[in-house]
Image (cartoon, rainbow, N blue to C red):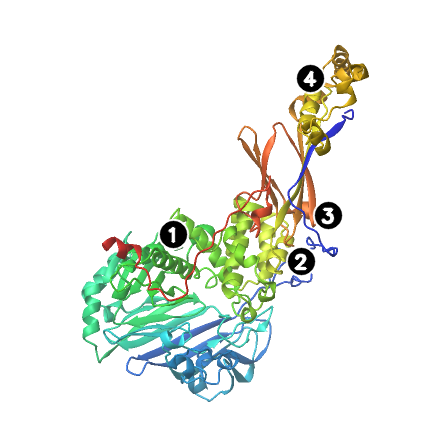
């Protein structure tokens, strides 16, 4: 094609940022080499388990008694530990998580404290540990009843073996213990009890109640990092048989399947229980009226509930005489697990309406995007101020007001916590990541899936985490109080944003903006399939997502997971160029308009305003051809020159002259350091819009600025960066051409305390 002369029509700069020093170049597209473990026969470079992948197994047979008078747990367990590793083991490690509540716990020792102007008695008492928590070990014996040598190191216990445990061998041993159950309302914790003053009853949500095997893996050996409270649990899969002895008027919810329903349920309850197994809506097994009667008449006798669970990594249970119990079947590709809810009357009417519905919805949505839910039950238990998960059972907050009303926040907060905690059955109860090391692998992935489930529950669901725009305030925050996602669980700043919100947002951006739904959904499902009932690491996740999608994402993992940079792109300059068509009718009219739009010379303008006359105006003889010449008038010679010009152009060049007459050169700057795709929305003079997505790879050779030219058939009246807020850009005020004011609001505040406002349900009654 022959060269066509261009000329600049106008130039607009939206904003200018001046740096005092040049930024050092950084290869943000460098592959994650040193950051990832070397592939081997256990874990492949594709992110899949290798041909020699192995994992340990631990089976438990337990007898547990809960003393409702003293609030104590008494336990005995027989552990069968299988050494499936290629290594000879000379000792075994167990977790003693209850020791986190002991007076000499490191959690107490490292907790900072301060004195303020006003303090409660409890505040003062809590300066020193006072609760007699922690395991009281009575026996540690081998299968023959011989004492085993053991050493307790805070929340860990080492058992020294009399003879090494060879690969392929198993070791059976017994432990007997007891401990005081903590008041969760007073001391906090992931398990404990809640006391109801009105009817003098307890609701127990019990977990971490038994000494459990530490995981021994190919990538870390024994994972015996101390339990300090934030980093959760790293656990083996195994089979459980647990006998739970409780007051005979208690109703028990538990991991596993109830083995002796005829021994613990009334005939009416048993009939309802059987009906629920095929019901498509919740069936109330233990009614509110029955629960109220049990609250009044406290039994002095005991019953034993027996549960079995196969291929689970942990065990939890809840028990109370206050429980209402409902259940229904959920169709998961032909299988029918039971979705169940246990809650006191204080949870109604909210819980009877929404809890089991939320459980069934969660199982369906998560199964669609990961693997089919494999367990026989999924349980939601209501307990105040809690959200905690275990295989097949979770403890969830969200309580109405005493008058039965509730706010919208309470309603959706309850549904969200149920979705989230039930969802933990998939991450990490099945896709069994190391929570003690990487919180985001279960919380972040699960929060992303929670967002997916919330979208399918209610189109206007008030989601907290997932959309890119919701993470902006965190991303633009103080970097000295921010840690990369890839930080040990006990060392994370801003735990919720870091381990829940940011990884969930990152995955949503991957799905919607970078990979696209089809590629992302396939890769995410493949990760779940590969690592179901296994122990994945972050490397396995990163590699699988790339391997199954064919998308190079190392730049994305590096920016979102290994760094703390934020996204802040700005529209630096917009320049409009138009082709010189050589058509005198168009070009001279354009030049005339350009000239008329120029601001007048201020001196000449004021001379004219003051009436000053020029020589030419005074003396007509001073005028010649050029005083009357119109340079913008089209002459026959101009038309002839244009016709000669057209004869030299081919059809493609002529088409270009007629169709693509607006060329916009746009420069974008990366001010935040986090590279992301560049998304433009163009609005044209006729009101039409066009969106252009440019992959993040545009930054490969040009960061921190990139320049791109767009050829348009119509005049553009406005340009927006990231119009749908997909990239978590922290400052959208510099995302527009022409510049646009982005309003914010402030509130007039008067110091002082105000009574809480009634919720909308209460106001409607008023």
Helix or strand or loop: what does disc 1 sit on? loop
Q: Secondary structure at mark 2?
A: loop
Residue 243: x and y in percent read 33, 75
Q: Is residue 366 above or below residue 392?
A: above
Q: Which mark is residue 332?
A: 1
Name the residue nearer the viewer: 253 or 727: 727
Q: Secondary structure at mark 4?
A: helix
Residue 128 placement, left or right of 48? left
The circle on residue 701 is 3
Q: Indicate left or right for 495 with 301 as reference.
A: right
Verify CB contact (< 8 Å) between mark 4 and mark 1: no
Q: Quadrant of residue 103?
A: bottom left
Residue projecting furthest to the top = 636
The mark lying in front, picked from 3 and 1, is 3
Earlier-in-chain disc, 3 versus 1: 1
Q: Which residue occupies 51% across, 66% down?
A: 495
Q: Which residue is mark 2?
A: 32
- Residue 464, position as x, y percentages in the image: 45, 55
Query: In which quadrant is the N terminus drawn?
Result: top right
Q: Nearer the viewer, mark 1 or mark 2?
A: 2
| 453 to 207, vertically: above or below | above
Q: Which mark is residue 585?
A: 4
- Sequence-first disc among 1 and 2: 2
Mark 1–mark 2 CB contact (< 8 Å): no
């Amino acid at each position: 094609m022959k060269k066509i002369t261009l000329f600049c029509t106008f130039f607009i700069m939206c904003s200018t940022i001046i740096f005092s020093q040049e930024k050092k170049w950084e290869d943000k597209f460098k592959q994650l080499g040193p950051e990832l473990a070397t592939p081997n026969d256990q874990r492949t470079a594709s992110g899949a388990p290798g041909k020699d992948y192995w994992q340990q197994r631990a089976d438990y047979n337990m007898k547990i008694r809960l003393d409702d008078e003293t609030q104590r747990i008494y336990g005995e367990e027989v552990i069968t530990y299988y050494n499936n590793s290629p290594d000879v083991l000379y000792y075994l490690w167990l977790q003693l998580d209850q020791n986190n509540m002991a007076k000499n716990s490191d959690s107490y020792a490292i907790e900072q404290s301060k004195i303020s102007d006003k303090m409660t008695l409890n505040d003062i008492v809590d300066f020193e540990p006072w609760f007699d928590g922690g395991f009281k070990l009575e026996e540690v014996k081998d299968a023959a009843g011989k004492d085993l040598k053991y050493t307790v190191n805070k929340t860990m216990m080492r058992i020294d073996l009399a003879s090494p445990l060879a690969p392929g061998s198993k070791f059976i041993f017994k432990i007997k213990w007891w401990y005081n159950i903590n008041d969760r309302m007073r001391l906090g914790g992931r398990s404990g009890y809640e006391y109801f003053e009105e009817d003098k009853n307890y609701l127990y949500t019990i977990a971490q109640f038994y000494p459990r095997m530490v995981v021994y893996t190919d990538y870390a050996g024994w994972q015996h990092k101390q339990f300090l409270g934030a980093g959760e649990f790293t656990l083996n899969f195994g089979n459980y048989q647990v006998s739970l002895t409780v007051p005979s008027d208690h109703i028990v919810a538990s991991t596993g399947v109830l083995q002796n329903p005829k021994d613990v349920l009334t005939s009416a309850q048993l009939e309802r229980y059987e009906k629920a197994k095929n019901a498509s809506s919740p069936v109330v097994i233990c009614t509110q009226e029955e629960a109220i009667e049990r609250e009044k008449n406290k039994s002095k006798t005991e019953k034993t509930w027996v549960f079995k669970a196969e291929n689970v990594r942990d065990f939890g249970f809840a028990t109370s005489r206050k429980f209402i119990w409902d259940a229904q079947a959920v169709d998961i590709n032909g299988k029918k697990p039971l979705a169940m809810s246990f809650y006191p009357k204080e949870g109604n009417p909210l819980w009877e309406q929404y809890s089991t519905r939320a459980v069934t919805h969660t199982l369906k949505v998560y199964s669609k995007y990961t693997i089919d839910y494999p367990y026989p039950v999924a349980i939601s238990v209501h307990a105040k101020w809690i959200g905690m998960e275990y295989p097949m059972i979770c403890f969830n907050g969200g309580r109405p007001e005493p008058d039965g009303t509730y706010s919208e926040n309470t309603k959706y907060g309850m549904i969200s916590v149920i979705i989230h905690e039930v969802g933990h059955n998939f991450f990490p109860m099945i896709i069994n990541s190391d929570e003690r090391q990487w919180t985001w692998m279960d919380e972040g992935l699960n929060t992303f899936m929670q967002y997916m489930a919330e979208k399918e529950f209610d189109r206007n669901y008030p989601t907290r985490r997932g959309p890119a725009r919701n993470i902006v305030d965190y991303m633009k925050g103080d970097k000295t109080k921010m840690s990369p996602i890839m930080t040990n669980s006990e060392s994370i700043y801003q735990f919720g944003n870091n381990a829940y919100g940011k990884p969930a947002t990152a995955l949503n951006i991957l799905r919607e903006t970078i990979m696209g739904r089809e590629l992302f959904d396939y890769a995410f499902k493949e990760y779940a399939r590969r690592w179901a009932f296994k122990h994945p690491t972050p490397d396995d996740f990163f590699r699988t997502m790339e391997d199954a999608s064919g998308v190079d994402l190392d730049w994305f993992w590096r920016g979102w997971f290994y760094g703390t940079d934020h996204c802040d792109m700005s529209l630096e300059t917009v320049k409009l160029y138009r082709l010189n068509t050589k058509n005198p009718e168009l070009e001279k009219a354009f030049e005339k308009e350009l000239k008329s739009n120029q601001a007048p010379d201020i001196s000449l303008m004021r001379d004219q305003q003051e009436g000053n006359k020029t020589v030419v105006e005074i003396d007509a003889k001073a005028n010649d051809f050029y005083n009357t010449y119109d340079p913008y008038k089209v002459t026959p010679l101009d038309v002839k020159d244009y016709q000669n010009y057209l004869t030299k152009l081919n059809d493609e060049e002529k088409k270009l002259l007629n169709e693509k007459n607006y060329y916009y050169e746009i420069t974008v700057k990366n001010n935040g350091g986090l590279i992301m795709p560049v998304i433009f929305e163009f609005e044209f003079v006729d009101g039409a819009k066009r969106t252009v997505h440019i992959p993040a790879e545009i930054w490969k050779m040009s960061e921190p600025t990139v320049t791109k030219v767009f050829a348009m058939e119509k005049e553009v009246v406005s340009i927006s960066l990231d119009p749908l807020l997909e990239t978590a850009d922290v400052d959208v005020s510099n995302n527009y051409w022409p510049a646009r004011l982005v309003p914010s609001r402030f509130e007039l505040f008067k110091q002082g305390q105000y009574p809480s406002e009634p919720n909308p349900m209460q106001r409607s009654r008023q």
